[in-house]
Structure formats: structure tokens, C-alpha cells
Image (tube, rainbow, N blue to C red):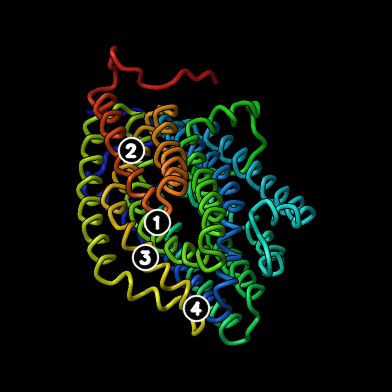
Amino acid sequence: MSHRGIPSIVTDGPLVRTFLRFVIPSALSLTAISTTSFVDSVIVGRFVGPDALAAVSLLIPWMSLLFGIALMLSVGGVVRVSKCLGAADREGASSIFSMTVFAVAILGVTAAVFGNIFSASLFRLLGAEGSLPVRMGEYFPILSIALIVQLVSLVLYYFIRADDRPELGTKALLTGGAVNIAADYLLVAHLGLGLQGSALGTLIAQLVQLSVLSSYFREKDRHLSFRFPRVGWSRLFRTAGIGASEFVNEFSVGAVIFTMNRLLLQSHGTDGVAAWGIVNAFIFISLMIYYGVVDSLHVLLGRNMGVGRWDRVRGLMGLSAAVIGILAISVTLLLVVWGERTIGMFLREGGQGAEAIAHQFVRWMWPLFLASGFNVLICVYLASRELASAAAMLSLSRSLLLPIGIALGVFFLSPETPVVVAFPLAEWITLVMALTFFWRYRPVSAVEPSLPLAEPTHD
């Protein structure tokens, strides 16, 4: 069977080999990110203290907002670029790529400038009190600069993978992760620079990561390049709608953590926020494992849908579901057996209060890891089919409406129950919704008169 467009292993290579070629680098990349974040939290908590861990946790909603916008633009752009490359439209692909990088760079610079000018108001909005604004002030100025570099690197990472170079993205993230861990240990644990050292380590790591990604532009056979966009900027915003579910995911993470920080400050004080930061590290590393499997599907599904290879779409979804099922069981078993033992790594002497609360939280939350991976997989599938509304609805339910609604209900109606119980309940309710959507929009064929393949777009 012949297919139009640029020949690619994505659409024509052996299915299992293609899947592994993209998934393994993606899994290694995101595992590197999560491991770096996990180790960074351990170093901050152990060598600076629980109040520093709480200060970093309070800033997560701000960072989630920025990452949400960048991911929305990147994922939407990658879906369109993948289809452009599948149709041999290199000019259109490069135009979308250029607009996305430029827009995200402006986002980072704007956030850094206004965030620092109005930092006192921002910290108050995020719930900082007591010594926490001072701690956040040590961390935030350098972090703001690091975020500019990190957001641009994020865009490059996604688009480089769309051009059949997943290994380069993996190399960049692994290198950046290793540098981040080493720099954090040197600057925080050895030189005692506290949160300033942690932020400086992040900046150094992101600059190294960006330099590795930039080697892409020295390759002669690449299909993407920077150029003045030949289409209107309105196309960028329409494209961003495809990645709306990714924005909802990140924005929801920030909104939920913001709400949790507020509730925990009232019920448990700073120790509660620090404990929540520890538990978040476990949630983050597990979700990154799942995203490591499904993240590459934006490219794999998009390219195969673009050339009508629905048999390969079904095969890719089946392989992904099998891998996620194995990982879900493994992660849950590891958390139940070893989770509480590793909490002690985060805190030095004097942090027993936060440690005890974190142990309690983990005992309530383990069921979420059995459902969250499948929810993420189905959201990515729906986004790749340009069913942005369905994907956003699922994302909004699992990561915002249900967690916040259940948490507030538990806080006011059953104060003796930890509010973190909202998270496993939200994931399992969403899983029922996700399976319903997947069955309705299952990959049967390229033309399904009874089912809308995509929301209308006008380029």
C-alpha cells in the first residue's frame, strides 16, 4: 500500500520497532526529568529545610501556568507539523515551528519581567506567609531566567522529535538532568547556597540542554528551519486549540496545588505544605513514567492519521495500553512497599512533623496510579484526532474539577479525612468517562460518517 508524503519509519516501518524507537527515548527523557525533580526536592528538603520545600511548592502554580501555555502551543504545533510533513509540506511545517518558538520565547520573557516587578503581590496570591515570602524571594529571580530557557527548550524538544529525531531529545534531557543533579549537589549541599543555589543549578542545566538541542540545526537533512512565517498569526492560535488538553492539564495542576496549599496551610500549617511537596514528587515521577510512553504518540498517531494508516493507529494504541498496564501495576507495588521508606530521604532532623503527614498522605493516594496512565493515554489519542473538546473535557475533569470539588467537600464535610483522597477518586471517575469517549471515537477508519473526526478548522 502506498502513502503520500515524506517516507518515514513512523508510517512505514515495523510497528513494534517504530513504537519502541520512539517510546524508549521518550521514556528515558521524561524519567530523567522526573528523577531530576525528585533529587532536587530531596536536596532542597534535606540541606535547606522544610520551609524551603514549602516555598518551592507554593511557586508550582505559577510555573504550571507558563508550562501549560507552552505545552498547548507545542503540542498543537507538533500535531499540525506532523501532518504537514506527512503531506510533504516543509514550508508550512517550518512556518508553524517558527511561530511557536517565537511565541513561547515572548511568553517566558514577559513572565520573567512582570513576575519580578510584582513578585510581592504574586507571593501573597500564592499563599505565602511568615518566612515563606523571603524564601521565595531567594529562589524566584534566578528561576525566572531559567524558565525562559526551559520553555524554549521544551518547544524544540517536541518539534525535533516530530522530525524523526527522538534520540537527540533524549540526549538533551539526560544531559541536562545529570548536570542539574550535579550542580544542585555542588551549589546547595556542598557550597551551602540554599535556594539560590538550587535555582542557579536549574539555569545551568537548562542552558546545557538548550545547547544540545540546538545541534539539530547543524544537520543537513532536517526538515524544519527558522523562517519568517508566511501565514497569519491567527493560525497559531487555531493550532493551539489542538493542544488545549495539555494546557488544561498543566493549568489544572497549578490550580489544584494552589487550592491544596491553601487548605493544608489552614489544617496542617507549613509542615502540611512541605508534606504535600514530598507527595507531589512521587506523583510527578509516576506520571512522567506514563507520559514517557504516551508522549511520543503525538507524533506517531498524528503522522499515521495524516496518511490514513488507521491499522497502525489501532496497533499503537494497543501496544501503549499494554505497556501502561504493566507499568501501573509495577509503580503501585513499588509505592506500597517502598514509598513510605523513601520519604525520610527528603528531610533532615527537625522535619518529623512533615514526614509523619507525608506518610499519612501516601497511604490514601496509591490507587490513583492504577488509573492515571490510561486517562493520559486516551487524552493524547483524542488530541491527536483533533477532538480538542473531548480531550479538554477529560483533562478538566481529572485534573481540576473533580480534585478540587472532592477536596473541598472532604475539607468541610469530613475534616478528619485527608483531602488528598480526592485524587484517586478523581482518577477513577475520569477513567469511566475516558473509556466511554474512546469507544465512541475509536480508530475504525479514516471516514466515519456517524462520528465527527475533528472539530472544524479553517486555515
Between the C-alphas of marks 1 and 3, the distance is 12 Å
- Residue at horizontal 66%, vertical 43%? 102
Residue 222 visible (yes or no): no
Residue type of the residue flagged with mark 3: Gln
> Which tag is nearer the camera, tag 1 or tag 4?
1
> Which tag is nearer the camera, tag 3 or tag 2?
3
| Residue 351, label in figure | 4
Q: Quadrant of residue 123?
A: bottom right
Density class for disc 2 (Cα within 10 Å; few <14, some 14-19, many ≥20) is many
Residue at the extreme right: 117
Q: Is residue 353 above or below residue 447?
A: below
Dots 4 and 2: beta carbons under 8 Å?
Answer: no
> Which tag is nearer the camera, tag 1 or tag 2?
1
- Residue that label 2 marks: 430
Residue 347 visible (yes or no): yes
- Residue that label 1 marks: 416
Q: Position of residue 292 (x, y in %)?
A: 36, 54
- Residue that label 3 marks: 360
Image check: 263 left or right of 317? right
Between the C-alphas of marks 1 and 2, the distance is 25 Å
Does dot 2 land on a helix, a strand or a loop?
helix
Which quadrant would the C terminus be assigned to in this image?
top right
Residue type of the residue flagged with mark 1: Glu
Q: Quadrant of residue 186?
A: bottom right
Image check: 137 left or right of 311? right
> Which tag is nearer the camera, tag 1 or tag 3?
1
Does dot 1 land on a helix, a strand or a loop?
loop
Q: Position of residue 384 (x, y in %)?
A: 38, 34
Residue type of the residue flagged with mark 2: Thr
Between the C-alphas of marks 3 and 4, the distance is 15 Å
> Which numbered disc, 4 or 2, marks the residue that appears first in the sequence?
4
Density class for disc 4 (Cα within 10 Å; few <14, some 14-19, many ≥20) is some
